Image (tube, helix red, strand yellow):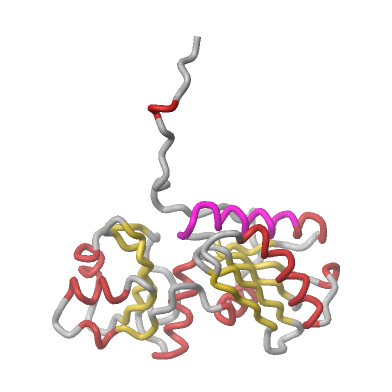
Amino acid sequence: MNLLAIDTALEACSVAVARDGEPPVIASETIGRGHAERLFGMIDAAMAEAGIVYAGLDRIAVTIGPGSFTGLRVGIAAARGLALVIGCPVVGVGTLAVLAAEARDIVGPLPVLATLDARRGEVYAQLFDGDGRATGEPDAGPPSVIAGRLAAETRIAGSGAALVAAAYGQGAESRIVAISATPDMASLVAIGLAAPPPAAPPRPLYVRAPDARPQSSAAVERR
């Protein structure tokens, strides 16, 4: 299977192209903003390096969140637009699922609490069992609340790991196995290849409302 993986959920703009089981060609830049301007150039370059034309793609995988509102829309729109033109399916993959998969590659079949620093004193989190199955939906909450999900064997991954470990105490820092702030593209490729055929196009997984709010003071009164 030939697969294109796209991640613009967070600070990085990343793509990976896997051709018939060969190691993927990966390109990633930490840019913060401007994903839309960089993404297609990176896709073109990775496709050329992998020796695949767009019509040769069998599947596209894209991270769906949680993450940046703008970034998620850029990646998902690009994946869905390409899939429509090519005629191939798109698999949506949770950002936290990718972080958990990277952690399991390190520690083996143990439960993983995947986290992201959500700012505003909160952490995005989702718990996965030793087989990589999610045991609940992703949500956001204070580190002290999220820390209550840690069982004896649970490991912690992601950019919110230190916050959760500090809230838990009792030497929980030793449970941190990966602190990646962005999804590992090799893990995204592996999940995308193994995922069942999607039943519907992917949609953004925002988890909580946006930080930005309309400026009511600048609103024009309607007549």
Magenta span: 66-81
Q: Residue at x 53, y 78 (%)?
A: 184
Quarter placement of the N terminus: bottom right
| Image: 165 above or below 104 | above
Instruction: Tell me if residue 74 is in the magenta stretch.
Output: yes
To which quarter of the image does residue 158 belong? bottom left
Left or right: 5 as drawn, with respect to 178: right
Q: Which of 81 and 37 is in front in this view?
A: 37
Q: Where is residue 196 in the image (x, y as percent from the top left)?
A: 62, 69
Q: Residue at x 29, y 80 (%)?
A: 154
Q: Position of residue 93 (x, y in %)?
A: 55, 66
To which quarter of the image does residue 191 belong? bottom right
Q: Residue furthest front?
A: 218
Q: Which residue is drawn at 61% across and 72% down?
A: 14
Instruction: Tell me if residue 133 is in the magenta stretch.
Output: no
**How many numbered discs, if any?**
0
Q: Residue at x 74, y 77 (%)?
A: 46
To which quarter of the image does residue 162 belong? bottom left
Q: Main secondary structure of the magenta part?
A: helix
| Image: 60 above or below 211 | below
Left or right: 1 as drawn, with respect to 216: right
Left or right: 134 as drawn, with respect to 89: left
Left or right: 34 as drawn, with respect to 121: right
Q: Position of residue 112 (x, y in %)?
A: 36, 78
Q: Where is residue 87 in the image (x, y as percent from the top left)?
A: 81, 59
Q: Which residue lies furthest to the left in this view?
A: 170
